[in-house]
Amino acid sequence: MFLIYKPVNKLFIMKINVNSEKKNEPKKEVYSLACPYYKKKFDTLEDLVQDVYISGMDPNYSVTLNGKSIREKLINFMAF
């Protein structure tokens, strides 16, 4: 996103937001954990679960979807 300043007259300048994203595109869902040091983000919950298995990350943190908690801990989505 960038801004364009367009002169309207001598006293006013109009600020126009120009966004490179299409407005009709659906927002991408991003899954992560509500943990201050876990910064990875994934497109699917399955990818998040797989990464936690592989990395050994503690699964007792809440899952976040687009930065908001879904009020479920990741361990509830894991099979042992």
Image (cartoon, rainbow, N blue to C red):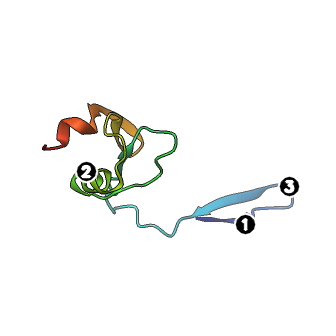
**Residue 27 visible in the shown view:** no
Mark 2 Cα within 10 Å, few/some/many (few <14, many 20+)? many
At numbered mark 2, what does the secondary structure look like: helix, strand or loop? helix
- The residues tagged by marks 3 and 1 sit, at their Cα atoms, a distance apart of 12 Å
21 left or right of 54 in image: right
Which residue carries the number 3 mark? 11
Horizontal and vertical percent for residue 76? 19, 35
Q: From the viewer's perspective, is 6 left or right of 23? A: right
Residue 42: image x %, image y %? Answer: 34, 57
Q: Is residue 6 visible?
A: yes
Under circle 3, the secondary element is loop
First reached walking from the N terminus: tag 3 or tag 2:
3
Q: Amino acid at mark 2?
A: Val
Q: In the rendered image, which quarter is residue 4 located in?
A: bottom right
Closer to the observer: label 3 or label 2?
Answer: 2
Amino acid type at circle 3 is: Leu
Tell me, yes or no, whether the two marked residues, 1 and 2, touch with CB atoms within 8 Å.
Answer: no
Is 26 situated left or right of 46 in this image?
A: right
Q: Residue at horizontal 46%, vertical 47%? A: 38
Which mark identifies residue 6?
1
Q: In the rendered image of this protein, does residue 54 appear above or below residue 72?
A: below
The residue wearing badge 2 is 49
Q: Quadrant of residue 73?
A: top left
